[in-house]
Image (cartoon, grey):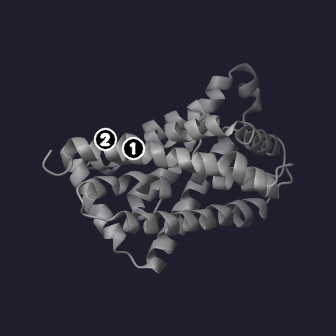
C-alpha cells in the first residue's frame, strides 16, 4: 500500500499530466466520466429504486442498497481512466500549494471537465435511459420522481453543505484508490466512501446531472431553472469546497513538497 506521502506524490504527477491534456482529450475523457457516473446512478435506481417493499419496512436498507450499487461510476473513472470534475477538485491543489501549477490551469481543467461531465451524464439520461424506457414504469418512475423532488427541495445552504460532505468522501475514495496497488484494493477503497456518501444522502453535482434531468425527461414537474438554482449550483460549490479544501488542501499541506 502507498503511504499518504506517496499518494500525494502520485496525485501531483497525475495532475501535472492532466494540466497538459489537449482540450479535445480532456472533453472526451470528461464525457466518459459523466457517462460512467450516470451508469452508476442507473444501476442504483434499478436495484435500490426497484425495492419499494423493502423501503416501506426498512428505509435504511434501501438507502444502503442504493449506495452500495452507485460506486460503479467512480470505480470505472479511476480504474479505466476518465476526467471527473469532483475528483479533480482535489487533484490539483497540492501542486497549487507548491506552486507547480497555476490557478488558471486548474480553472481551465475544471471548466472543460464540468462541461464534458454534463454532456456525458445527459447523454446517458436521455439516450441510454429515457429513450429505452428502462425506468418508464413503476416502481422506477416513482423512485426517479422522489429522488429528483427530494434533491430540489432543500435550501441553498443545506444543498451546499451536503455538497461538501459528498465530495469530501468522493475525494477520499480517490485517495484510497491511489493508496492501493492492486485492482481489488482500489475497488474496495473507492467503494466504501462512495457507498457512505450516497447512503447518507449527500449531494454530488455530477450524479445530479443524471438524476434530475432524467426526471425532467420522464415528465416530473421540475424545471431546468429549478434544477440549476435549487441543486446544481449549490451542490457544485459545496463539492469544490469538500474536495479542494478538506482533501486537496489538507493533504497537500501535510504531505506535499518538503513538509
Residue at 82 percent of width and 50 percent of height = 222
Q: Is residue 253 above or below residue 35?
A: above
- The N terminus appears in which quarter of the rendering? top left
Residue 106, horizontal then vertical, whole percent: 40, 63
Q: In the figure, is residue 204 to the left or right of 220?
A: left
Which circle's residue, 1 or 2, is located before the other in the chain?
A: 1
Residue at 78 percent of width and 38 percent of height = 146
Between 136 and 26, the one nearer to me in the picture: 26
Residue 7, horizontal then vertical, whole percent: 25, 49
Q: CA distance from mark 1 to mark 2?
A: 6 Å
Q: In the figure, is residue 131 to the left or right of 42?
A: right
In the drawing, what numbered circle is on residue 250?
2
Q: Quadrant of residue 156?
A: top right
Between 112 and 178, the one nearer to me in the picture: 112
Q: Quadrant of residue 154?
A: top right
Residue 90, horizontal then vertical, whole percent: 38, 51
Under circle 1, the secondary element is helix
Under circle 2, the secondary element is helix
Please rate how many residues cluster around mark 2, counting C-alpha atoms within 10 Å: few if below 14, some from 14 to 19, many from 20.
Answer: some
Pointer 1 residue: 245
Q: Is residue 254 above or below residue 77?
A: above
Q: Is residue 183 above or below residue 83?
A: above
Amino acid at each position: 500500500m502507498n503511504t499518504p506521502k506517496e499518494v500525494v506524490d502520485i496525485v501531483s504527477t497525475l495532475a501535472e499530466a492532466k494540466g497538459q491534456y489537449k482540450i479535445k482529450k480532456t472533453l472526451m475523457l470528461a464525457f466518459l466520466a459523466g457517462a460512467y457516473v450516470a451508469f452508476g446512478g442507473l444501476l442504483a435506481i434499478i436495484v435500490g429504486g426497484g425495492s419499494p417493499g423493502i423501503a416501506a419496512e426498512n428505509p435504511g436498507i434501501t438507502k444502503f442498497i442504493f449506495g452500495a450499487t452507485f460506486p460503479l461510476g467512480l470505480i470505472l473513472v479511476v480504474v479505466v481512466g476518465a476526467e471527473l470534475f469532483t475528483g479533480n477538485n482535489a487533484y490539483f491543489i497540492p501542486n497549487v500549494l507548491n506552486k507547480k501549477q497555476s490557478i488558471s490551469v486548474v480553472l481551465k481543467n475544471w471548466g472543460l471537465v464540468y462541461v464534458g461531465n454534463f454532456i456525458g451524464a445527459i447523454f446517458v439520461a436521455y439516450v441510454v435511459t429515457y429513450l429505452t424506457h428502462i425506468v418508464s414504469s413503476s416502481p422506477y418512475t416513482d423512485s426517479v420522481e422522489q429522488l429528483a423532488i427530494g434533491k430540489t427541495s432543500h435550501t441553498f445552504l443545506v444543498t451546499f453543505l451536503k455538497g461538501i460532505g459528498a465530495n469530501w468522501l468522493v475525494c477520499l475514495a480517490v485517495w484510497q484508490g491511489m493508496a492501493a496497488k492492486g485492482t481489488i484494493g482500489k475497488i474496495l477503497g473507492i467503494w466504501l466512501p462512495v457507498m457512505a456518501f450516497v447512503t447518507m444522502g449527500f449531494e454530488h453535482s455530477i450524479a445530479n446531472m443524471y438524476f434530475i434531468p432524467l426526471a425532467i425527461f420522464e415528465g416530473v414537474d421540475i424545471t431546468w431553472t429549478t434544477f440549476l438554482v435549487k441543486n446544481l449550483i449549490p451542490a457544485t460549490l459545496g463539492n469544490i469546497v469538500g474536495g479542494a479544501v478538506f482533501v486537496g488542501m489538507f493533504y497537500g499541506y501535510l504531505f506535499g513538497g518538503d513538509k
